[in-house]
Image: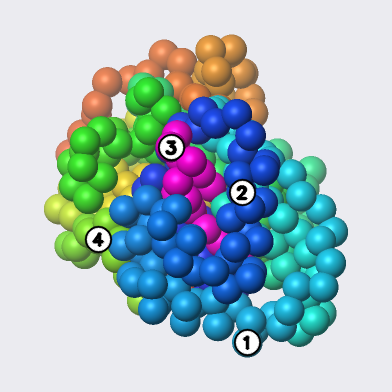
């Protein structure tokens, strides 16, 4: 997660690295000008090894630059520039007018602690999807679907906090991962087991009936994705009263429930993985009106009894940059499966542009 914009997103695990430079605005502006001016060799030299792996080569970067010019024309005027900070992260965001685009174009550059480019994204400035459910109150008594501390990478109702909001079905989705010392991994970022959330238990957020459970799909190596099966290994739960919960990117072989199983709050569903269209291990969760993603509308998911940055929240929606933890968590629970007599209809397709958090 994470929503990809116009197919021109180049993002890496280091995109979320901690930043500590004195002038991220001036550094990123210089890099933006270098790219827009066609100086791709300077961009290559200023990129992290992970970012270079995503670009591929200097030649691939030149091709990417050419694609940008082909799709958007030439930059005519800068409309705004700012540096967004979230839990120690700085993101340079530039919005400008281009000759070949009827809508503003947004350029995002992330820098790591050594002033190297760790993330790069350019595409039409996203617009939040309309929703008739902005004032909706969740009916199911939701608890966080995780235990321990998790970082909200995407969460909230504004595009600055949550790229999912551009999609009608995932209008109120969230992506969770784990941070330690400002990073989502330790050691070699190419190894899935080095990610702090890898293999951690994923729990049922409320009582319900499993309407879809997929397992057996491979966990993607860092730098690869599975856009044909964006949710990867996933579980869909009918919470009743028209609310369906989607939990995605489980570790292969870890899903412990099947279609028709009745689950209770806190029951273990599986383990956090990296299956599907995802850039690194994380949990994707969203609530919507139907079990079929392409036909549903997103619903706000208000969780009960958790802490956000140490402060107790009796009922709320986790926001980007918060470290959240459920209050009075159950221990891992794996119950014998019970079958519902008439399980609801399962979803039969996923839209092509979802389930990636950055």
4 vs 2, front mark: 2
- Residue at label 3? 114
Confirm or deny contact between disc 3 and disc 1 (CB under 8 A).
Answer: no
Q: Please name which of the two marks, 1 or 2, marks the residue nearer to the observer.
A: 2
Q: Residue at x 63, y 25 (%)?
A: 315
The answer for how far apart the CA atoms under marks 1 and 2 are is: 23 Å
Q: Specify which label sits upstream in the sequence, 4 or 1.
A: 1
How far across and how far down the image is residue 253, in percent? Answer: 15, 53
**Residue 220, labelled with which disc?**
4
239 inside magenta stretch: no
Of the two numbered discs 4 and 2 on the same chain, state the one appearing first in sequence.
Answer: 2
Report which residue position mark 1 lands on: 70
281 relative to 306 in the view: left or right:
left
Asked whether residue 142 is in view, the answer is: no
Single out the mark in the foreground, 4 or 1.
Answer: 1
Locate residue 198 relative to residue 303 in the image: left or right. Answer: left
Marking on residue 2: none
| Picture layout, residue 80 above or below residue 223 | above
Which element is circle 3 on?
loop
Note whether 283 is above or below 6 in the view shown.
above
Q: Is residue 330 above or below residue 253?
A: above
> Which mark is on residue 28?
2
Whether residue 357 sits left or right of residue 99 in the image: it is left
Residue 85 x, y percent position in the rendering: 63, 34
Residue at the image point whose x is 50% and y is 32% from the top: 19
Residue 311 seen in render: yes
């Amino acid at each position: 997660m994470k929503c990809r914009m116009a197919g021109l997103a180049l993002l890496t695990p280091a995109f979320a690295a901690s930043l500590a430079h004195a002038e991220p605005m001036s550094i990123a502006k210089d890099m933006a000008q270098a790219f827009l001016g066609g100086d791709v060799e300077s961009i290559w030299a200023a990129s992290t090894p992970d970012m270079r792996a995503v670009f591929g080569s200097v030649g691939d970067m030149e091709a990417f630059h050419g694609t940008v010019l082909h799709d958007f024309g030439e930059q005519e005027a800068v409309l705004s520039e700012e540096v967004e900070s979230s839990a120690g992260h700085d993101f340079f965001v530039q919005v400008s007018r281009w000759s070949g685009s009827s809508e503003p174009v947004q350029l995002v550059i992330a820098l790591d602690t050594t002033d190297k480019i760790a993330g790069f994204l350019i595409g039409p400035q996203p617009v939040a999807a309309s929703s008739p459910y902005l004032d909706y109150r969740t009916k199911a008594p939701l608890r966080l679907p995780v235990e321990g501390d998790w970082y909200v990478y995407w969460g909230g109702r504004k595009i600055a906090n949550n790229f999912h909001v551009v999609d009608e079905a995932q209008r109120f989705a969230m992506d969770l991962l784990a941070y330690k010392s400002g990073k989502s991994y330790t050691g070699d970022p190419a190894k899935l087991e080095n990610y702090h959330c890898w293999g951690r238990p994923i729990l049922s957020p409320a009582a319900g009936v499993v309407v879809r459970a997929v397992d057996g799909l491979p966990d993607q190596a860092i730098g690869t994705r599975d856009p044909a099966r964006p949710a990867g290994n996933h579980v869909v739960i009918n919470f009743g009263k028209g609310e369906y919960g989607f939990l995605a990117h489980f570790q292969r072989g870890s899903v412990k429930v099947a279609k028709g199983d009745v689950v209770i709050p806190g029951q273990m569903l599986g383990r956090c993985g990296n299956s599907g269209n995802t850039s690194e291990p994380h949990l994707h969760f969203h609530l919507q009106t139907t079990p079929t993603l392409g036909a549903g509308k997103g619903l706000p998911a208000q969780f009960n009894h958790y802490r956000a940055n140490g402060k107790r929240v009796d009922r709320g929606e986790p926001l980007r940059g918060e470290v959240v933890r459920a209050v009075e968590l159950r221990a891992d629970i794996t119950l014998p499966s019970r079958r519902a007599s008439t399980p609801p209809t399962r979803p039969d397709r996923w839209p092509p542009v979802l389930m990636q958090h950055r």
